[in-house]
Amino acid sequence: MEISMPRHRFLLVALIVLLTASSLWAQIPTITLIAPASSDTGATIVISGTNFSAIASDNLVMFGPVAAHVISSSTTQLHVRMPAGATFDNVRVEVHGLTAISH
């Protein structure tokens, strides 16, 4: 007995499988350096590490409880604007639900 599936339904299923599989291979980001180590509000901070997204809006950067604006990004560096009220304790970078925390 042969089971047939309409082409559009097959393509939808294939797309869902592909998207699900790609998230399984996502790598946990790491933070290796934050420079400068202290700064004023509005200054540009460079966060170096691995497994960041090259799409700036895919990276969420938190300085303590305060979110920073990501100006530009690559897979190894984030340039962010130092937000008001931020601290350098527990700098976090979240990429696609995976999080790096500075120590």
Image (spheres, rainbow, N blue to C red):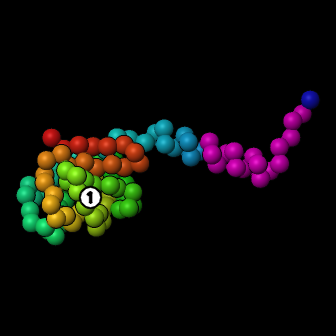
Residue 77, position as x, y percentages in the image? 26, 56
The kind of residue on which mark 1 rests is Ala
Q: Is residue 88 above or below residue 45?
A: above
Question: Which structural element holds mark 1?
Answer: strand
Quarter containing the C terminus: top left
In the displayed structure image, the side of residue 2 where residue 42 appears, left or right: left
Q: Mark 1 sits on what residue?
A: 67
What residue lies at 41% left-to-right and 48% top-to-bottom? Answer: 96
Q: Is residue 52 above or below residue 25?
A: below
In the displayed structure image, the side of residue 77 where residue 95 appears, left or right: right
Is 17 or 61 nearer to us in this picture? 61
- Specify whether residue 77 is in view: no
Residue 82, position as x, y percentages in the image? 18, 64
Residue 81, position as x, y percentages in the image? 21, 66
Magenta stretch, main secondary structure, is helix
Q: Which residues are magenta?
A: 2-17
What residue lies at 33% left-to-right and 49% top-to-bottom? Answer: 94
Residue 66: quarter of image:
bottom left
Residue 60 lies in the magenta-colored region: no
Is 103 or 3 nearer to us in this picture? 103
Residue 18: quarter of image:
top right
What residue lies at 22% left-to-right and 46% top-to-bottom? Answer: 31
Residue 14 lies in the magenta-colored region: yes
